[in-house]
Image: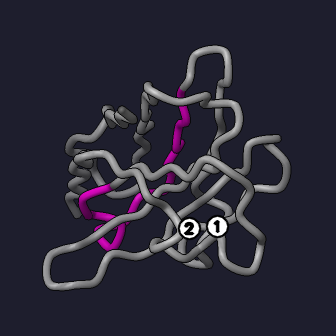
Amino acid sequence: QVQLVESGGGVVQAGGSLRLSCAVSGRTFSTSTMGWFRQAPGKDREFVAALGWSSGNPYYADSVKGRFTITRDNAKNTVSLQMSSLTPEDAAHYYCAASFGIIGASIIRQQQKYPYWGQGTQVTVSS
């Protein structure tokens, strides 16, 4: 049984930083493609960042490029999202997602390619 558990959300002032983490259990983490998605109130869930199993090129939404960094630690079965220069537009419920297998670059941003999801963690950014 695959489980994803996010942590690290909270309240931060605009311009501040937060680090989200996602712990994965139940499958061989090192072969997973990991993604972060977010959903703000009244909006659809959207892609934020993704990283393949080999920790090759990360993928980012244009809105977070240069501010967010996705990394993974295969020894600890965790994936992290370092967020900096946060704005109120970044406030959302952030979800970690996993797919066990290689996802092509053309579809890595598609949330339907990720069968496993965590419950999410809330990020609030005060202006």
Residue depth check, mark 2 versus mark 1: number of the one nearer the observer: 1
Q: Residue at x 53, y 28 (%)?
A: 78
Give amino acid for label 1. Tyr
Q: How is the image coloured?
A: one colour
Crowdedness near tag 1: few (<14), some (14–19) or many (≥20) residues, C-alpha within 10 Å: many
Q: Quadrant of the N terminus?
A: top left
User: According to the image, label 1 marks what residue?
Assistant: 60
Of 49 and 16, which appears nearest the observer?
49
| Residue 97 placement, left or right of 39 | right
As drawn, which residue projects farthest toward the bottom?
43
Residue 67, image quadrant: bottom right
Q: Secondary structure at mark 1?
A: strand
Crowdedness near tag 2: few (<14), some (14–19) or many (≥20) residues, C-alpha within 10 Å: some
Q: Position of residue 62 (x, y in %)?
A: 62, 78
Vertical position of residue 32 compared to residue 94: above or below: above
Identify the magenta region.
78-94
Of 63 and 78, which appears nearest the observer?
78
User: According to the image, label 2 marks what residue?
Assistant: 64
Q: CA distance from mark 2 to mark 1?
A: 7 Å
Give amino acid for label 2. Val
| Residue 36 placement, left or right of 71 | left
Residue 29, image quadrant: top right
Q: Residue at x 44, y 25 (%)?
A: 25
As drawn, which residue projects farthest toward the left?
42
Q: Position of residue 75 (x, y in %)?
A: 66, 15
Per the image, is 85 magenta? yes
